[in-house]
C-alpha cells in the first residue's frame, strides 16, 4: 500500500493507528500548524495595541487625541505603560487584522533644491529656532494665523493661534516663546510681510528684525516661495494640519486656543523624534540651559527700536539678469551668476553686504561680491545681558 501511494512505512502505520483509534474521521488531513506558537503576540499585548489605537482615534484622551497612531507611536505608548512592544511589523499586522489600518495620504513631492543651495552648518551648541505661519478659516469666515516655532534639533514646539498678523501680536509671540524656550543664536524664517517692513522703501529694516538683532539673534531668510528650504517647520506644519486641525471641527478661535495646549503637550512629551525611539522631551532634557528673556521684558512694546549690530543672511536664487533682491533693493551680480544660488550677508555694524557662492556642501563658500549698505542712523552694540559669542553658521569662507 505504501509503495503504491508513494508513502513511507512509517506513514502507513501512523495512519492505521489513527484509523483504529478514530475510525474514518482519523483519516482526514490534519493541520500542519504547530500546537504552540512561541513567537505569537500575547493576548494582553494585542488587546493593548487595539485599545491604544481606538483611544487615540476616539478623541477621549485630551492629549492623545492629537497624537500619531501608527505602529511607532503605539509602541511608544506600550513602553510608557510598562509593556515590551512587538516589532512595528507585528503591530501593523494586528491593526490590519482588526480593521484599524487607514490608507496613508500620498505626500506631494517637492522640487529638490539646487546643489549649490547653502545649507546652514551650525557649530555645536548653537541654538536654532525655525518659525512659520499657517492660515486657516473658521466657520463664518473668520481667519486666524497658526504661529508655529520649533527649537532645533529636538523640534520642541511653541505654538499660538493669532487673530491677526500684526507687529504687536507677532512680537508678543516671539517674546513669550523666548521667555520660555530661551533666546536662540539663529532664527530661520521666510520673507513674510510682517517682518519684511516697508513694501517699497529700500534698505528698510523692520521693527521685528530690529528686535531680533537687539537680542543678539542672527537671522536667515530663505528664498521666497521655497518651503522645501525650511523642511523642519514644513514637516511640523503637516503634522499640525493632520493631527490637530483635521481631527476637530473648531467653531471659533477660542476653541482653537483652548485645544492647542493639548496638542503642544503631545508634541513635547509623547511625540517621537522621526526615525528614533527618543521623545522630544528626552532630547531637550539633554540640552544646555537657555538664556531666557525676563518676565518684565517690554522692549517689543516700544514704538521704535534702535538699530543694533549683527548679521542678516539672505539666501536667494539669481535671476536671468544676474540680479538678486532683498530689503526692497536690487543687487547686481552679473550674468555669469544667473541661475545660481547665493547667500548675501548683511553686516550691520560694517554697513556692508557680502555675497557668497558655495558650489556644493563639500566645498567652502567663495566671496563673489560686496556692496555698501546705506545706514543713516547710529548702530548700537548688543546689550550686555544678551551679548554672547557669535556661533559658526556657515563653512569657512575661502579667501
Image (tube, helix red, strand yellow):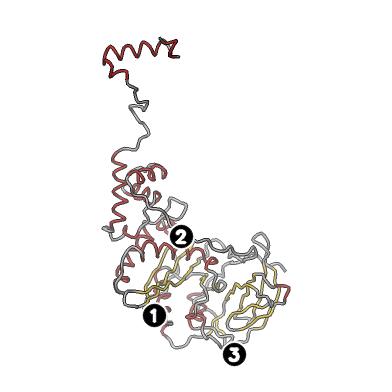
- Sequence-first disc among 3 and 1: 1
Q: Secondary structure at mark 1?
A: loop
The residue to which callout 2 is attached is 154
For residue 200, which quarter of the picture?
Answer: bottom right
- Sequence-first disc among 3 and 2: 2
Q: Is residue 105 above or below residue 163?
A: above
Q: Are marks 3 and 2 in contact (CB under 8 Å)?
A: no
Q: Secondary structure at mark 3?
A: loop
Q: Position of residue 205 (x, y in %)?
A: 54, 83
Q: CA distance from mark 3 to mark 1?
A: 32 Å
Q: Position of residue 154 (x, y in %)?
A: 46, 60
Mark sitting on residue 376: 3
| 165 with respect to 323 (left or right) | left
Nearer mark to the viewer, of 3 and 1:
1
- Residue at horizontal 43%, vertical 14%? 5
Q: Position of residue 297 (x, y in %)?
A: 40, 79
Q: CA distance from mark 1 to mark 2?
A: 29 Å
Q: Residues within 10 Å of mark 1 (few under 14, many from 20)?
A: few
| 99 with respect to 362 (left or right) | left
Query: Quick one: 142 or 82, which is closer to the camera?
Result: 142
- Residue at horizontal 34%, vertical 78%? 142
Q: Is residue 327 above or below residue 109?
A: below
Mark sitting on residue 164: 1
- Sequence-first disc among 1 and 2: 2
Query: Quick one: 6 or 54, which is closer to the camera?
Result: 6
Amino acid at each position: 500500500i505504501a509503495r503504491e501511494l508513494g508513502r513511507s512505512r512509517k506513514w502507513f502505520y501512523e495512519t492505521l493507528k489513527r484509523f483504529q483509534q478514530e475510525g474514518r474521521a482519523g483519516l482526514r488531513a490534519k493541520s500542519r500548524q504547530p500546537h504552540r506558537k512561541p513567537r505569537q503576540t500575547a493576548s494582553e499585548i494585542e488587546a493593548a495595541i487595539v485599545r491604544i489605537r481606538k483611544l487615540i482615534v476616539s478623541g477621549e484622551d485630551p492629549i492623545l487625541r492629537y497624537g500619531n497612531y501608527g505602529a511607532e507611536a503605539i509602541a511608544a505608548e506600550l513602553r510608557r505603560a510598562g509593556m515590551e512592544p512587538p516589532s512595528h511589523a507585528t503591530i501593523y499586522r494586528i491593526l490590519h487584522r482588526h480593521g484599524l489600518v487607514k490608507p496613508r495620504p500620498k505626500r506631494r513631492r517637492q522640487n529638490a533644491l539646487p546643489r549649490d543651495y547653502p545649507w546652514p552648518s551650525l557649530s555645536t551648541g548653537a541654538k536654532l529656532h525655525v518659525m512659520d505661519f499657517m492660515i486657516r478659516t473658521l466657520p463664518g469666515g473668520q481667519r486666524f494665523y497658526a504661529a508655529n516655532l520649533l527649537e532645533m534639533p529636538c523640534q520642541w514646539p511653541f505654538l499660538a493661534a493669532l487673530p491677526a498678523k500684526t507687529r504687536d501680536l507677532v512680537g508678543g509671540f516671539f517674546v513669550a516663546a523666548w521667555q520660555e524656550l530661551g533666546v536662540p543664536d539663529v532664527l530661520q524664517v521666510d520673507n513674510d510681510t510682517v517682518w519684511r517692513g516697508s513694501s517699497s522703501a529700500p534698505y528698510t529694516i523692520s521693527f521685528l528684525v530690529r528686535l531680533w538683532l537687539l537680542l543678539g539673534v542672527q537671522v536667515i531668510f530663505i528664498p521666497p516661495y521655497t518651503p522645501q528650504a525650511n523642511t523642519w517647520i514644513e514637516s511640523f506644519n503637516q503634522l499640525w494640519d493632520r493631527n490637530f486641525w483635521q481631527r476637530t471641527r473648531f467653531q471659533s478661535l477660542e476653541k482653537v486656543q483652548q485645544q492647542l495646549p493639548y496638542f503642544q503637550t503631545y508634541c513635547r512629551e509623547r511625540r517621537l523624534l522621526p526615525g528614533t525611539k527618543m521623545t522630544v522631551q528626552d532630547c531637550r532634557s539633554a540640552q544646555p540651559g537657555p538664556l531666557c528673556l525676563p518676565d518684565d521684558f517690554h522692549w517689543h512694546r516700544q514704538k521704535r527700536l534702535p538699530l543694533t549690530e549683527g548679521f542678516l543672511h539672505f539666501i536667494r536664487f539669481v535671476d536671468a539678469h544676474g540680479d538678486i533682491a532683498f530689503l526692497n533693493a536690487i543687487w547686481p551680480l552679473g550674468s555669469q551668476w544667473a541661475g545660481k544660488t547665493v547667500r548675501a550677508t548683511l553686516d550691520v555694524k560694517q554697513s556692508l553686504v557680502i555675497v557668497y557662492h558655495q558650489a556644493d556642501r563639500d566645498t567652502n563658500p567663495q566671496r563673489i561680491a560686496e556692496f555698501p549698505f546705506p545706514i543713516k542712523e547710529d548702530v548700537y552694540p548688543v546689550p550686555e545681558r544678551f551679548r554672547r559669542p557669535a556661533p559658526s553658521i556657515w563653512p569657512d569662507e575661502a579667501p
